[in-house]
Image (spheres, rainbow, N blue to C red):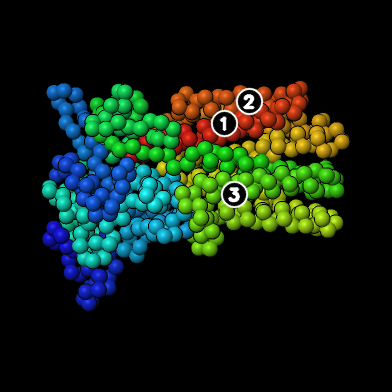
Amino acid sequence: MTSTSLPASHRPDTGRPEASAVPRWGKVIDHSRCIGCHACSTACKSENEVPLSVNRTYVKSVDIGEFPSARRAFQVTRCNQCAAPPCAFACPTSAMHQRPDGIVDFDKEICIGCKACIAACPYDAIFINPEDNSAEKCNFCAHRIDMGLEPACVVVCPAEAILVGDLNDSGTKVSSIVGRSVVSVRRPEKETQPKLFYRDAHQATLDPLAAVRPAADLYMWSEQVSGTGYVPSGHPDGSNSAAAAMLSYDVPHRAPWGFKVSLYTLTKGIAAGAYLLPAIFAVSGNLDPDNLLFRWIAPVVSGLFLALTGALLIWDLKKPKLFYLIFTRPQWKSWLVRGSFIIAGFSLVLVLHFVGTLLGLDGFVRGLAVIGIPLALLTAVYTAWLLAQAKARDLWQSALLPVQLAAQCLLAGAAALIPLIEVFIADDYSHMTYPCLAGFAILNLLMIAGEVSLVHATAHARLAVDEMVKGRFARFFWTGIALMVLACLAPWIGTPAALFALAGLLLFEHAYLQSAQSVPLA
């Protein structure tokens, strides 16, 4: 192999018989050779026209040891070209996809900017291009590979520290190194099967929590952005590493999902719960199906908040005009797609409910609730699987998350209905509604207490809880808890308890979602 081209057997359209064999591309970064010159970073920017403020690849540096026995270690950071890429599984339109040769590539024409791929990547290797609002990352310079050329970073590396080759071909240098030398991958516990291998890399560079964050966030050559939506690099106190290691250079990273997603979890919970509770009471015989609550109030509230949920989801897209691609070219492994179709099905039930009520088809409306109840419940809880696809966020990898979301939707639905019941229904429901609201608030508080007090399996999850309870998002968390405690007093304080419950849920959801994204991944 020369420094600029691939073997003829691996070049496309050569006419050779061996060219028909599909390669499995892999990359080795030899840190016994890397000198930290950043030539790969600049070559990548030039070759792929990467804008300022974002990077497809960069060189992180960590200072290890104490004077006079100290040294600087580097890590070339980029997409890991996973064999089981979570970004491709999470992408709703297949904009992020895996080619037959294993390269994880992207198609900007069908990217809707949902940021699901960013949330899913355990390596923080994907970003939104600020010039075209499309998701982007290292794609192995696939355009050069297809022409029989090596990636730009490989060509310019002065120390030959970056190597690419076919892992299926035992004759390539990459295959030989991976098969015979000691190599490492980043975060193997995420089961993504990375095809980016590190040789002689120090663990303090591979583990994003192994190096302590420098005092006052003073990094070499740069300052980390620490405002809202940004993720500080390094471990806050260094308790995850026995080695004396300090992060000296990194690039800023952003959390993909902000307040719009936090608000969407509340509006979706209200939409599901406002229909779910009256429908359950009506089907079980505890509420007259001809009652105004089931016939009109519940579907109106549910429909309005479901429409608001859809508006928030579209508003959060970087390319909102392309939202229809979720339905016209769905990638069914994505829970963003599955959730969109669940919401569409629930919306259809609500429309049929209105039509049936207008036409006086009371039996049809009651029967429709048998379908509407599971759809409402799915609308409330599908987000648990959507968050679970974000494999990098350990706090969201909880088997109890669907139960937590179901409990939240019951509290949100009850809180949204109580003021309307008191205004529009003459019957006295306070003997039933306020105890229900208080009970749902107590249930949610108990589940939150379990979430924050139990021992978490990973350092990532523990740090996320720390950020939620005593870090950057503590004021949201504790204010939300205080408001939900007030909601427990509903039988005594009346309607204001419903407003306390809704505000408390929103603040808690914001703290929960943002703290999970506040732990550094790269």
Q: Residue at x 43, y 36 (%)?
A: 229
Q: Residue at x 53, y 41 (%)?
A: 260
Q: Residue at x 17, y 62 (%)?
A: 5
Quarter of the image where the C terminus is located? top left
Residue 430 at what x, y percent from top left?
81, 31
Q: Dot 3, how many residues are within 10 Å of its Cα: few (below 14), some (14-19), or many (20+)?
A: some
Find the distance from the CA under tag 2 to the CA under tag 1. Answer: 9 Å
Residue 4 at what x, y percent from top left?
15, 60
Determine whether the residue tagged by mark 1 lies in a helix, strand or loop. helix
Find the distance from the CA under tag 2 to the CA under tag 3. Answer: 27 Å
Residue that badge 3 annotates: 310
Tell me: residue 209, above or below residue 353: above
Could you tell which of marks 2 and 3 lies nearer the N-terminus?
3
The answer to whether mark 2 and mark 1 are in CB contact below 8 A is yes
Residue 327 lies left or right of residue 23; in this view the side is right
Q: Give residue 123's quadrant in the image.
A: top left
Quarter of the image where the N terminus is located? bottom left
Q: Give amino acid for label 2.
A: Leu
Residue that badge 1 annotates: 507
Residue that badge 2 annotates: 483
Outermost residue, front direction? 131
Could you tell which of marks 1 and 3 lies nearer the N-terminus?
3
Say which of 419 and 243 sits in front. 419
Q: Residue at x 62, y 45 (%)?
A: 308
Is any part of residue 503 visible from this angle?
Answer: yes
Q: Nearer the viewer, mark 1 or mark 3?
A: 3
Q: Give amino acid for label 3.
A: Gly
Tell me: residue 86, above or below residue 18: above
